[in-house]
Protein backbone atom coordinates (compact mmCIF):
# COMPACT_ATOMS: atom_id res chain seq x y z
CA UNK A 1 0.00 0.00 0.00
CA UNK A 2 1.27 3.45 -0.90
CA UNK A 3 0.82 6.20 1.69
CA UNK A 4 1.39 9.87 0.88
CA UNK A 5 1.37 12.48 3.64
CA UNK A 6 1.76 16.25 3.31
CA UNK A 7 3.10 18.71 5.87
CA UNK A 8 3.58 22.46 5.78
CA UNK A 9 7.29 23.16 5.24
CA UNK A 10 7.28 25.78 8.01
CA UNK A 11 5.92 23.25 10.53
CA UNK A 12 8.51 20.60 9.66
CA UNK A 13 11.26 23.23 9.73
CA UNK A 14 10.51 24.03 13.39
CA UNK A 15 10.67 20.32 14.29
CA UNK A 16 13.88 19.63 12.34
CA UNK A 17 15.58 22.75 13.73
CA UNK A 18 14.71 21.73 17.26
CA UNK A 19 15.97 18.17 16.76
CA UNK A 20 19.29 19.31 15.27
CA UNK A 21 19.89 22.02 17.88
CA UNK A 22 19.06 19.81 20.90
CA UNK A 23 22.01 18.35 22.80
CA UNK A 24 20.06 15.28 23.96
CA UNK A 25 17.22 13.23 22.46
CA UNK A 26 14.46 10.95 23.70
CA UNK A 27 15.36 7.28 23.75
CA UNK A 28 13.21 4.78 21.84
CA UNK A 29 12.65 1.14 22.84
CA UNK A 30 15.36 0.12 20.38
CA UNK A 31 17.82 2.56 22.01
CA UNK A 32 17.14 1.09 25.44
CA UNK A 33 18.53 -2.27 24.35
CA UNK A 34 21.58 -0.91 22.47
CA UNK A 35 24.90 -0.99 24.37
CA UNK A 36 26.14 2.00 22.37
CA UNK A 37 23.90 4.28 24.44
CA UNK A 38 25.08 3.13 27.88
CA UNK A 39 28.21 3.68 29.97
CA UNK A 40 27.89 0.30 31.71
CA UNK A 41 27.54 -3.30 30.59
CA UNK A 42 24.17 -5.07 30.94
CA UNK A 43 23.47 -7.13 34.04
CA UNK A 44 23.27 -10.94 34.07
CA UNK A 45 19.73 -10.75 32.63
CA UNK A 46 20.86 -8.55 29.74
CA UNK A 47 19.21 -5.41 31.15
CA UNK A 48 20.96 -2.06 31.25
CA UNK A 49 20.99 0.26 34.26
CA UNK A 50 18.91 3.24 33.11
CA UNK A 51 21.04 5.55 35.28
CA UNK A 52 23.92 4.95 32.83
CA UNK A 53 22.09 5.88 29.62
CA UNK A 54 23.83 8.53 27.50
CA UNK A 55 21.09 10.52 25.77
CA UNK A 56 23.77 12.72 24.21
CA UNK A 57 24.80 9.74 22.04
CA UNK A 58 21.38 9.47 20.38
CA UNK A 59 21.40 11.13 16.95
CA UNK A 60 18.85 13.87 16.13
CA UNK A 61 15.63 12.51 14.67
CA UNK A 62 11.99 13.21 13.94
CA UNK A 63 9.33 10.64 14.67
CA UNK A 64 6.24 10.11 12.55
CA UNK A 65 3.53 9.23 15.07
CA UNK A 66 -0.13 8.31 14.92
CA UNK A 67 -2.36 8.45 17.93
CA UNK A 68 -4.78 11.37 18.05
CA UNK A 69 -4.03 12.54 14.51
CA UNK A 70 -0.79 11.94 12.63
CA UNK A 71 2.27 14.15 13.01
CA UNK A 72 6.03 14.60 12.99
CA UNK A 73 7.66 15.44 16.30
CA UNK A 74 11.24 16.29 17.25
CA UNK A 75 12.83 13.86 19.69
CA UNK A 76 15.05 16.65 21.04
CA UNK A 77 15.01 17.33 24.76
CA UNK A 78 13.54 19.30 26.33
CA UNK A 79 10.45 18.78 24.19
CA UNK A 80 9.22 21.58 21.96
CA UNK A 81 6.11 23.00 23.64
CA UNK A 82 3.33 25.46 22.82
CA UNK A 83 2.49 28.33 25.16
CA UNK A 84 -0.26 26.18 26.72
CA UNK A 85 2.36 23.49 27.57
CA UNK A 86 1.10 20.98 25.00
CA UNK A 87 3.64 19.47 22.59
CA UNK A 88 4.28 21.42 19.39
CA UNK A 89 4.14 19.02 16.44
CA UNK A 90 3.87 19.18 12.64
CA UNK A 91 0.51 17.63 11.76
CA UNK A 92 -0.17 15.85 8.51
CA UNK A 93 -2.48 18.09 6.49
CA UNK A 94 -6.00 16.76 6.80
CA UNK A 95 -5.13 14.38 9.67
CA UNK A 96 -4.70 16.63 12.69
CA UNK A 97 -6.06 16.12 16.20
CA UNK A 98 -9.25 18.10 15.50
CA UNK A 99 -10.71 15.72 12.91
CA UNK A 100 -12.70 12.56 13.47
CA UNK A 101 -10.36 9.77 14.60
CA UNK A 102 -12.28 7.35 12.34
CA UNK A 103 -10.92 9.26 9.32
CA UNK A 104 -7.35 8.99 10.60
CA UNK A 105 -7.88 5.26 11.25
CA UNK A 106 -9.40 4.81 7.76
CA UNK A 107 -6.35 6.38 6.13
CA UNK A 108 -3.58 4.88 8.28
CA UNK A 109 -5.12 1.91 10.10
CA UNK A 110 -6.40 1.71 13.66
CA UNK A 111 -3.09 0.99 15.38
CA UNK A 112 -0.97 3.70 16.96
CA UNK A 113 2.58 3.89 15.67
CA UNK A 114 5.92 5.69 15.99
CA UNK A 115 8.53 5.57 13.22
CA UNK A 116 11.77 7.47 13.91
CA UNK A 117 13.69 9.03 11.01
CA UNK A 118 17.08 10.76 11.02
CA UNK A 119 16.59 14.52 11.27
CA UNK A 120 19.20 15.00 8.55
CA UNK A 121 16.82 13.38 6.06
CA UNK A 122 14.35 16.22 6.69
CA UNK A 123 17.04 18.92 6.78
CA UNK A 124 18.17 17.87 3.28
CA UNK A 125 14.58 17.85 1.98
CA UNK A 126 13.88 21.23 3.59
CA UNK A 127 16.92 22.77 1.91
CA UNK A 128 15.59 21.68 -1.48
CA UNK A 129 12.09 22.88 -0.60
CA UNK A 130 13.47 26.26 0.45
CA UNK A 131 15.35 26.67 -2.85
CA UNK A 132 12.13 25.88 -4.73
CA UNK A 133 10.02 28.17 -2.48
CA UNK A 134 7.81 25.16 -1.78
CA UNK A 135 5.00 25.30 0.73
CA UNK A 136 4.53 21.56 1.27
CA UNK A 137 6.76 18.65 2.18
CA UNK A 138 5.51 15.32 0.87
CA UNK A 139 6.40 12.03 2.59
CA UNK A 140 5.58 8.99 0.45
CA UNK A 141 6.01 5.43 1.65
CA UNK A 142 5.58 2.13 -0.13
CA UNK A 143 7.02 -1.32 0.57
CA UNK A 144 9.29 0.01 3.32
CA UNK A 145 10.79 2.75 1.13
CA UNK A 146 10.35 6.39 2.15
CA UNK A 147 10.71 9.38 -0.14
CA UNK A 148 10.63 13.07 0.79
CA UNK A 149 9.80 15.60 -1.92
CA UNK A 150 8.29 19.08 -1.98
CA UNK A 151 5.56 20.97 -3.77
CA UNK A 152 4.38 24.54 -3.93
CA UNK A 153 0.89 23.74 -5.15
CA UNK A 154 -2.02 22.98 -2.84
CA UNK A 155 -3.59 20.95 -5.66
CA UNK A 156 -0.91 18.25 -5.19
CA UNK A 157 -1.87 17.94 -1.53
CA UNK A 158 -5.58 17.85 -2.29
CA UNK A 159 -5.16 15.19 -5.00
CA UNK A 160 -3.37 12.90 -2.54
CA UNK A 161 -6.03 13.49 0.13
CA UNK A 162 -8.76 12.61 -2.39
CA UNK A 163 -6.90 9.40 -3.26
CA UNK A 164 -7.11 8.32 0.41
CA UNK A 165 -10.86 8.04 0.04
CA UNK A 166 -10.68 5.70 -2.97
Image (cartoon, rainbow, N blue to C red):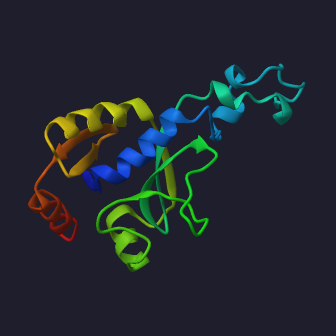
Q: At 24% from the left edge and 48% from the top edge, which residue is drawn? A: 138
Q: Residue furthest right?
A: 44
Residue 4 located left or right of residue 33: left
The image quarter containing residue 29 is top right
x, y percent for residue 1 = 27, 52
Residue 138 located left or right of residue 69: left
Foreground: 91 or 109?
Answer: 91
The image shows a total of numbered marks equal to 0
Q: Quadrant of the C terminus?
A: bottom left
Q: Is residue 162 above or below residue 32?
A: below
x, y percent for residue 164 = 22, 65
The image quarter containing residue 28 is top right
Foreground: 141 or 57?
Answer: 57
Residue 45 located left or right of residue 4: right
Q: At 80% from the left edge and 20% from the top edge, which residue is drawn? A: 39
Q: Residue furthest bottom?
A: 100
Q: Is residue 36 above or below residue 4?
A: above
Residue 144 located left or right of residue 140: right
Foreground: 32 or 110?
Answer: 32
Q: At 90% from the left edge and 25% from the top edge, which residue is drawn? A: 44
x, y percent for residue 106 = 34, 70
x, y percent for residue 2 = 24, 51
Q: At 49% from the left edge and 42% from the top edge, which residue is drawn? A: 18
Amino acid sequence: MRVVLHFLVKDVLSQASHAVQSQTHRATQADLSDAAFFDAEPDANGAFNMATIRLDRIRPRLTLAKDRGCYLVSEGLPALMRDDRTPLVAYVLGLDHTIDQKRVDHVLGADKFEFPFPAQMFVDALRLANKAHAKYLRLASQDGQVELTHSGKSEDHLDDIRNFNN
